[in-house]
Amino acid sequence: MSQDAKAWVPLFPKDDVSFILASVLRCSANLHKKHDTEREDRLSNRLRMLIRRDAAFRQSGIVVDREVSVFNDNSDSEEPIGRIDFRFLSAHRQADADWHFVIEAKRLHVTFKRTGWQSLAAAYVTGHQGMMCFIDGRYARNLTESAMLGYVFDGKVEKARNSVAESIAASPVKLKCAVPSQLSPSQIVDGLSIISESRHTLPQGTFKIYHLFVAV
């Protein structure tokens, strides 16, 4: 991002980002799938409910929305280009600041009746509704960071993290990865080492994606 851009684009408060990620992880501890192939939208609906009922989150003043439509303002199309899974609005937002933080959720390690166990890491990383939502700019407008949330159906969180890391390393060009093109431990939340991050070079500059993996 250029110095001129930094002068006029307000950044989402870093303290709010760390609070949101910690809240999502805390509330996800009480999130459980109802059956072995439950869709992520149903899990996300219940997670939204858990987050909104969380005492610390309620006191923060941060707002969480689900399935928020996104439009291309440079197009004449009336149809949305996507729907954000989770949109968080900062408690410190100003009238002239488009302050929001986005999280996209995907299933990982799902066992289907007909096809058996599937990693689904490729859908998470290079699928149209995975990380590519940010890389191709659909959900990255006016943002410098976002997050992915992986619902790990078999509970093997570290195996899922490694699968995603391998998939990211295999597609550095498509993902516009910054060097090094890998999934790394994140220090965004003090004392919490289970969050990972990846860095990507987008038109607005370096774009960071935090990765949260939770057993459901």
Image (spheres, rainbow, N blue to C red):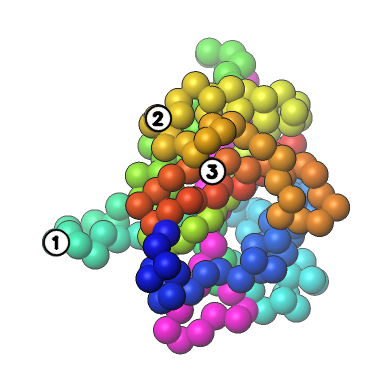
Label 2: how many Cα within 10 Å (few below 14, some 14–19, many 20+): few
Residue at the spot of label 1: 76
The percent position of residue 174, horizontal first and vertical second, equals: 38, 31
Q: Which residue is mark 2?
A: 173
Per the rendered image, the range of residues in magenta is 90-111
The total of numbered circles placed on residues is 3
Residue 34 visible? The answer is no
Magenta span has 110?
Answer: yes
What x and y, as percent, mark residue 8? 41, 76
Q: Is residue 13 above or below residue 157?
A: below
Residue 183: x %, y % from top left: 62, 34
Q: Marks 2/1: CA distance?
A: 30 Å
**Left or right: 206 in relation to 34:** left
- Image quadrant occupied by the N terminus: bottom left
Identity, as a three-letter code, of the amino acid under mark 2: Val
Q: Residue furthest front?
A: 3
